[in-house]
Image (tube, grey):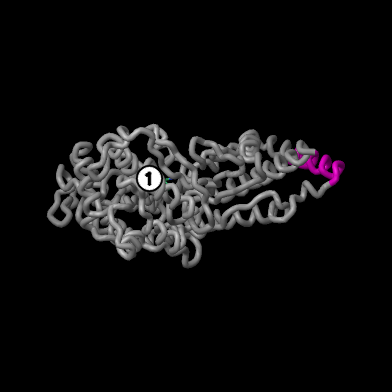
Amino acid sequence: MPNAYEAMNDAELKAAIADLEKQADDLRALDLKLDMARGKPSPQQTALSRPMLDLLTSESDLSDEGVAADNYGCPEGLPSARRLAAELLGVDEKNVIVNGSSSLNLMHDVVCNAYTHGIGGNKPWSQQGKVKFLCPAPGYDRHFTVTARYGIENVPVPMTAEGPDMDVVRRYVEEDPSVKGIWCVPMYANPTGITYSDEVVRAFAHLKPAAPDFRIFWDNAYCVHTFKGEGDHLLNIFDALEEAGASDLVYEFGSTAKVTFPSSGMAYMTASPADMAEVRAAFASMRVSPEKISQLAHVRFLKDAAGVRAHMEKHAAIVAPRFALVEEKLTASLADLGVATWTHPCGGYFVSFDGPEGSAKAIVSLAAELGVKLTPAGATWPYGKDPKDTNIRIAPTFPTLEELGQALDVFVVAVKLVSARLVAEAR
Ligand code: PMP
């Protein structure tokens, strides 16, 4: 669709800008203080898990299948917690560990261990000169921060509607032994909300890395976070690996951060038996044993995968109207202008928005001036550098519906005004 502002003559464009500036002034006068910056559940959502807090009391039996939750021991996590995580990931519980409250923390520790001690008997990454990580972009900023902090070069890879561009991934992974990993959010990706197609998952499983210590970091953070209809389907990467006759290629992560309580959930990971043996040995020097009381509360509350799904339906009832409002407001105000595109996810926490080239920073800054905080422009790219300055992550879950409506009204005015000004500046 052609850009409506480009189609205007100079006088029309000037009038449109004046009108939008007036709208911006009216919004500024409201002195709003709204936050659409981070993907946090709303207080209504975290309240869904409060009954979990009543399940353990001073009178409770704190044992789980013979393991005492109130003492050291069982470093791989409580048996019932491992079973629950294994059921969610669709893998054998023998290859699962449940540890800590943050999956990002597990990812960090696995990267750190590879950096200091190496993977599979290979030299530590720190002793291999330049090492690189592939970063499908737009992606999750905190992934990029982990690898950047170790001096690993983050290399952006384009995202398509089906997942990362696998021709680009294959070329890097199969031709460059300094490429040691790739960050993936395969389901309801942060921030695009897309789910990798079966073809993309199979292409990952068939990779023949040039580096023996290359691993795919498969962060399945949103595997149960469907809020619309049947939701998406993700092929199980470990089934795809088996089909491909491959092993020792994937670390998979997940957590209940956005199922129960962010920062007080239950984090878990899985990999091949050989990779897990190595991870367990590394973790043994980092922690005595995990937070088993929290694990016990989680399994008594959520019980099994069916219990998690039932719980997530309650989240969906709260979250779905917010995503519907984003779609409604963006469509009503922007669909006919030809200046922006955005994603239409069925799950996850984000909508990924693209404005005209060179607009994202200006839109985020104008929205901030008008009282709406957004994720910083560029954050979805390695080193915060979005080469075309187009992408903005919209996180609609935390505000109330009323606040979200106001925030979106501000956002669309900012998008329109910046888009119109860009056309005027180019004349
Ligand atoms: N992975 C992704 C893709 C996320 O979006 C988030 C949270 N925003 C996390 C991991 C963090 O999960 P945790 O709290 O378990 O570290």
The amino acid on which the numbered mark 1 sits, given as a three-letter code, is Gly
Q: Is residue 17 magenta?
A: yes
Q: Is residue 166 above or below residue 414?
A: below
Q: In the drawing, does residue 151 fall left or right of residue 365?
A: left
Spot occupied by residue 293 in the image (x, y as percentages of width and height): 23, 47
Q: Is residue 124 above or below residue 223?
A: above
Residue at image point 43% right, 55% down: 186
Using the rendered view, name the quadrant where residue 116 is placed.
top left
Q: Residue furthest left?
A: 66
List x then y, in percent, for residue 258: 40, 50
Query: Is the residue marked 1 within 8 Å of ligand 1, measured from its CB?
Result: no
Would you say residue 401 is visible in this rendering? Answer: yes
Position of 377 with respect to 418 (left or right) is: left
Q: Residue at x 82, y 43 (%)?
A: 13
Nearer to us in this view, 190 or 299:
190
Camera-nearest residue between 152 and 252? 152
Q: Quadrant of the N terminus?
A: bottom right
Please name the residue that numbered disc 1 is placed on: 181
Q: Is residue 394 left or right of residue 307?
A: right
- Residue range corresponding to the magenta coloring: 9-23
Camera-nearest residue between 25 and 246 = 246
